[in-house]
Amino acid sequence: MKRGFGSDNHSGVSPEVIEAIVKANSDHALAYGDDEYTKRLEELFKETFGPQTRVYLVFNGTGANVLSIDAMCRSHEAVVCAETAHINVDECGAPQRVVGCRLLTVDTPDGKLTPALVKTRLHGFGFEHHSQPKAISISQPTELGTLYTKEEIKALADLAHSYNMYLHVDGARLANAAVALGCSFKEMTTDLGVDALSFGGTKNGLLMGESCVLLNPALDVDMKYRRKQMTQLASKMRFMAAQMICYLESGIWRRNAEHSNAMAQLLRREVEKVEGVKIMYPVQVNSVFAQLPTAVWHRLQERYFFYDWDEAADVVRWMCSFDTTEEDIHAFVNALKEELSR
């Protein structure tokens, strides 16, 4: 498949990660997480996020989000999230089906929740006819490529806790956010009062597997049974753990995220020179959202794969990956110019 700008899931795997998996592929190891790699990863997460941290490896990002929500909510409770949130748009109703809880969505101009927006959904407490708000879920970065500042996350955590609620972060691209903000993972989560985190890496050079990270130990109740019931317990977990250890210890999380972010900035700068194309949101991580004529992006899609984000508004999304090159960017922009000139 030709390298395109459809998703950072389309890229391959960092060579170091492949090497780590191959290295782990020797002798036998106990299954279901009772191996030395998983034990080491559990300690590494404590070093990264704080000694209170509990981590549960799962197969994918949806599994991490649903398991996190299940730790926070019962079926009569609800999660407040942005209308554009991945848990609302791209998980096929998994939180509702598996956990049974309700999603209380909020329309946002930039993908970001604010305390004022969240408060519009915080009512009906103690009224048995209404789902009870129990958690706030944000994506960092958001689905629109925008970033919460540390102060904004802290404000949401404080709001949640004042209502006896929890704050969850969908961190499928948390590495890109950490690089953009110039902070550590812990400074952006634990230190701000985040209770649960979905920590991802497949969009940034890993082969497979994500993690449900509980930063509030009070949420760690029967989680091994909950993960098993959700069909998210891997038998040969050492291979998932080995790649995540490599990801954190070698620093490739930072290197890969720095590169994909830089490629998005290059794409933004080049596209801004092109008449007839409008950048829709601030480019803060590795995504660029642009508005251009329908016929143009339809023809461009015949040459490069990418997703239309809002077809009615002619907005498309271009994603950069850890292996995107400057040559890829320039070739794509040249193709864009050609289609605009037709």
Image (cartoon, helix red, strand yellow):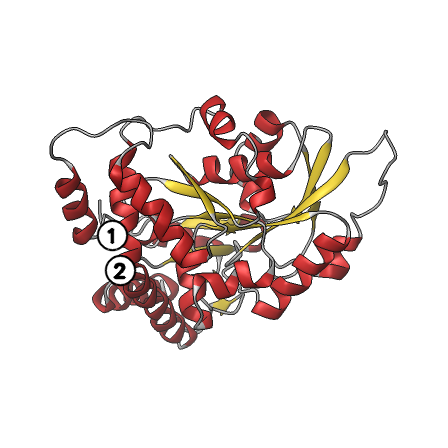
Kind of element beneath mark 1: helix
Horizontal and vertical percent for residue 96?
62, 30
Residue positioned 40% across, 58% down in the render: 48
Mark 2 in CB contact with mark 1 (< 8 angstroms): yes
Residue shown at the point (44%, 61%) measured from the top left: 185
Residue 250 image offset from top left, x and y in percent: 24, 59
Which mark is nearer the camera, 2 or 1? 1
Q: Is residue 33 visible?
A: yes
Residue 277 x %, y %:
46, 68
The image quarter in which residue 132 lies: top right
Q: In this view, does 226 lie above or below 41?
A: above
Residue type, numbered disc 1: Cys
x, y percent for residue 307:
42, 48
Locate the N terminus by quadrant: top left
The secondary element bearing badge 2 is classed as: helix
Q: Toward the viewer: 282 or 161? A: 161
Identify the residue under disc 2.
Answer: 252
